[in-house]
Image: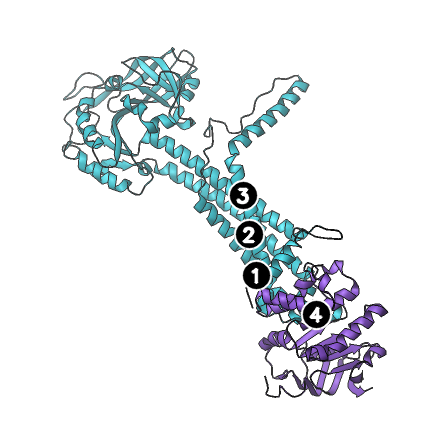
Chain colours: A cyan, B purple
């Protein structure tokens, strides 16, 4: 038996005659009804699978990139709070000379409560050197919405757009920031809010300190700009202040300091090597406190977040996979009908010498062709929809809002515009990332399922009794 | 295969076939003896249900039998294992049925070529053989037509060409003119009885048509499970 003959018979029986012009031609292009339904079923079940795969990859990469470039950096080194900008300079110099490192900064973070004349909200204050905002990675994801991006002096602050909205403030307004401050009353006490000095390491910097009194500290800032990373979780909390302001405001125990490091290839497997190189660069400069465990890569810093993304994606794909399984079972059912429809053809082929294997191959081939065509349809449509997902969502929103506005007009009520992808919860624009390897894997799985689903009908076809059929006919 | 290739194309000895049902045992063939030389023709007449088709199915290895010996084209069917049957059907016998049974989605040429293609012939060779055969049965100009575009006679001609494509030693024709008008039936009769001289194959024809039966070199009547000369 030649492989070509069962495939030829399967393809022709399944897809019908090639289109031919001319008088009297009764070409029947395209598959028969049941098999067309099976192809469509596989295709339709694959569309959401491919769409979810691509869109979730895009969303995850979009959010991950925003976190990495604007919040967590690629690598972080925890530093003691007493480290000053001046003290950090030699570490930064050393880091910038480290192989694989493209930039490094000292960042001081602290939390507090921002109060405007209209509202109050928790804030995460970040004190970073101005060059952070000029970094290409930062600039790619951190967008200036209004005013200036870089705060200067002790009284300027730049807010995330969502935070500004929550506080109901705009550029030029004043806000009050309340931060916790402690007055050290015991041995080694100094002025209120300052950090004790002389600690041995970042982890045990203040062990043994004698903190006894809490005192809220009020600081006044003028908003000089609003920025957005396009992701609510980030925009809703952060506020940037200058290193000078950070030195005085962000102090122990409501603040933390760390070196933020960016690398040439944050997604490469070489991040572990960079981690070691960073340790080697910093340890000579800070022998009193530096330990290698203080160095963490971006997947380690936001491990739970990325795991949650991965789990969500896996669950979605699993659910979509069940739809694909149902489509494959439908294919098996359609093929069984196809076998019944073609039983006389099978009998004739057997009378002409077709072996059981040939008959099985014909119907397995029909299953493969059906699965292949369905997969091609589903994957193509899925990729097309994914590539145009932002436009499609915008179009859908437009249609819904037009309809809503019409109904609202008829009811004499104001319409409330609908936002399908509320930027409060999603990225404002879905980045489309087609991982062709994963798409090929899904396509392969779909074809394999189709082939598996065709095995039973193919076996049934090979059991058809020739003489019985011919006698009946 | 046995070594009597030069002997009879078909030899049946004491062939018995029964059909079992819950109510009764139907004794269809009760000791058939038949010997047919190569390049000869034989007709079998008989009433409906007399067992003509069953005899042809047994000779064509579509059906197993209960007792006796059947040798076709040198193959001893009573010894042939199940897995050897497709090769036998493919290479030794060719079937022509009352209905043409052409595959509707394949052209006349493709229908004729398929048995050769399935038997392992390269596609070009299978198609070339089919084209030659279609020309021989007067279908050269209709080879690219689908069965639905052919007349009844043309379909049956194509079916005959299909039966010949693997150069069989025996042609089994079961009422091949049963669905045809008189003119087409005559043409098919001429074609079928010309096959022994054209191809060297032995032809067994089952028919109700006495005129057709009498065109065969050997003529038999099948009645009550036994074969008698006409």
- Image position of A374 with respect to B187: above or below: above
> Which residue bears the numbered disc 2?
A372
Mark 3 or mark 1, which has the lower sequence index?
A: 3
Chain assignment, label 4: B
Q: Which mark is residue B220?
A: none
- Looking at the rendered structure, the secondary structure element under dot 1 is helix
Which residue is pictured at 43% across the width and 15% down the height? A168
Q: Using the image as rendered, state which of residue B193 and residue A84 is in the foreground.
A: B193
Q: Mark 3 points at which residue?
A: A380
Q: Do labels 2 and 1 share a chain?
A: yes
Which of the 4 image quadrants contains residue A66? Answer: top left
* Circle number at residue B161: 4
User: Could you tell me residue A13's position as x and y percent?
Assistant: 65, 58
Rounded to the nearest angstrom, the CA distance separating label 2 from label 1 is 15 Å
Q: Mark 1 points at which residue?
A: A455
Quadrant in the picture for the N terminus of chain B = bottom right
Nearer the observer, A277 or A215? A277
Disc 2: host chain: A
Q: How crowded is mark 4: few (under 14 residues within 10 Å), some or many (20 or more)?
A: many
Q: Do labels 3 and 1 touch, CB within 8 Å?
A: no
User: How far apart are the two marked residues, 3 and 2, measured between alpha carbons?
Assistant: 12 Å
Structural crowding at the residue carrying mark 1, measured as other residues with C-alpha within 10 Å and reported as few (<14), some (14–19) or many (≥20): some
Q: Mark 2 against mark 4, which lies toward the viewer?
A: 4
């Amino acid at each position: 038996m030649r492989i070509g003959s069962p495939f030829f018979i399967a393809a022709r029986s399944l897809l019908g005659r090639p289109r031919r012009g001319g008088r009297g031609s009764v070409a029947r292009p395209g598959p028969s009804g049941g098999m067309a339904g099976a192809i469509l079923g596989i295709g339709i079940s694959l569309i959401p699978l491919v769409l979810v795969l691509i869109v979730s990859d895009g969303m995850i990469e979009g959010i991950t990139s925003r976190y990495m470039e604007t919040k967590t950096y690629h690598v972080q080194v925890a530093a003691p709070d007493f480290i000053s900008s001046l003290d950090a300079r030699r570490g930064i110099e050393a880091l910038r000379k480290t192989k694989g490192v493209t930039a490094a900064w000292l960042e001081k973070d602290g939390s507090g409560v921002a109060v405007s004349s209209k509202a109050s909200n928790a804030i995460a204050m970040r004190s970073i050197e101005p060059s952070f905002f000029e970094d290409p990675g930062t600039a790619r994801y951190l967008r200036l919405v209004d005013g200036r991006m870089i705060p200067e002096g002790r009284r300027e602050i730049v807010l995330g757009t969502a935070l500004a909205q929550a506080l109901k403030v705009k550029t030029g307004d004043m806000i009050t920031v309340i931060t916790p401050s402690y007055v050290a009353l015991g041995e080694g006490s100094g002025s209120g809010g300052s950090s004790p000095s002389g600690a041995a390491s970042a982890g045990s910097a203040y062990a043994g300190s004698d903190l006894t009194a809490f005192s809220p500290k009020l600081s006044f800032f003028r908003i000089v700009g609003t920025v957005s990373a396009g992701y609510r979780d980030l925009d809703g909390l952060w506020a940037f202040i200058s290193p000078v302001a950070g030195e005085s405001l962000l102090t122990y125990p409501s603040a933390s300091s760390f070196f933020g490091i960016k690398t040439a290839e944050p997604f490469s497997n070489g991040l572990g090597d960079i981690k070691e190189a960073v340790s080697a660069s910093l340890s000579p400069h800070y022998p009193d406190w530096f330990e290698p465990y203080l160095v963490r890569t971006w997947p380690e810093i936001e491990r739970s977040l990325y795991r949650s993304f991965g789990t969500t994606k896996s669950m979605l794909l699993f659910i979509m996979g069940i739809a694909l399984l149902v489509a494959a079972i439908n294919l098996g059912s359609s093929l069984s009908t196809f076998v019944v429809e073609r039983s006389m053809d099978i009998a004739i082929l057997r009378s002409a010498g077709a072996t059981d294997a040939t008959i099985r191959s014909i119907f397995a081939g029909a299953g493969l062709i059906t699965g292949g065509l369905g997969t091609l349809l589903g994957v193509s449509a899925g990729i097309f929809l994914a590539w145009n997902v932002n436009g499609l969502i915008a179009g859908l929103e437009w249609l819904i809002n037009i309809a809503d506005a019409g109904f609202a007009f008829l009811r004499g009520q104001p319409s409330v515009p609908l936002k399908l992808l509320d930027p409060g919860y999603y990225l404002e624009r879905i980045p489309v990332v087609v991982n062709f390897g994963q798409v090929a894997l899904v396509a392969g799985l779909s074809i394999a399922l189709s082939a598996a689903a065709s095995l039973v009908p193919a076996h049934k076809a090979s059991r058809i009794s020739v003489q019985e059929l011919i006698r009946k006919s | 295969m046995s070594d009597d290739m030069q002997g009879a194309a078909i030899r049946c000895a004491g062939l018995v076939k029964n059909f079992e049902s819950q109510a009764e045992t139907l004794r269809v063939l009760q000791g058939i003896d038949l010997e047919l030389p190569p390049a000869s023709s034989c007709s079998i007449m008989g009433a409906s249900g007399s067992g003509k088709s069953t005899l042809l199915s047994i000779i064509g290895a579509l059906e197993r039998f209960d007792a006796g010996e059947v040798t076709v084209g040198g193959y001893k069917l009573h010894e042939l294992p199940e897995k050897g049957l497709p090769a036998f059907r493919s290479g030794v016998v060719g079937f022509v049925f009352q209905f043409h049974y052409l595959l509707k989605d394949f052209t006349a040429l493709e229908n004729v070529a398929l048995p050769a293609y399935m038997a392992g012939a390269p596609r070009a060779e299978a198609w070339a053989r089919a084209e030659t055969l279609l020309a021989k049965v007067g279908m050269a100009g209709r080879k690219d037509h689908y069965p639905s575009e052919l007349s009844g006679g043309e379909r049956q001609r194509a079916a005959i060409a299909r039966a010949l494509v693997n150069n069989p030693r025996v042609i089994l024709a079961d009422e091949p003119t049963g669905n045809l008008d008189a003119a087409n039936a005559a043409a098919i009769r001429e074609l079928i009885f010309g096959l022994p001289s054209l191809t060297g194959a032995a032809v067994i024809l089952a028919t109700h048509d006495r005129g057709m039966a009498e065109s065969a070199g050997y003529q038999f009547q099948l009645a009550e499970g036994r074969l008698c000369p006409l």
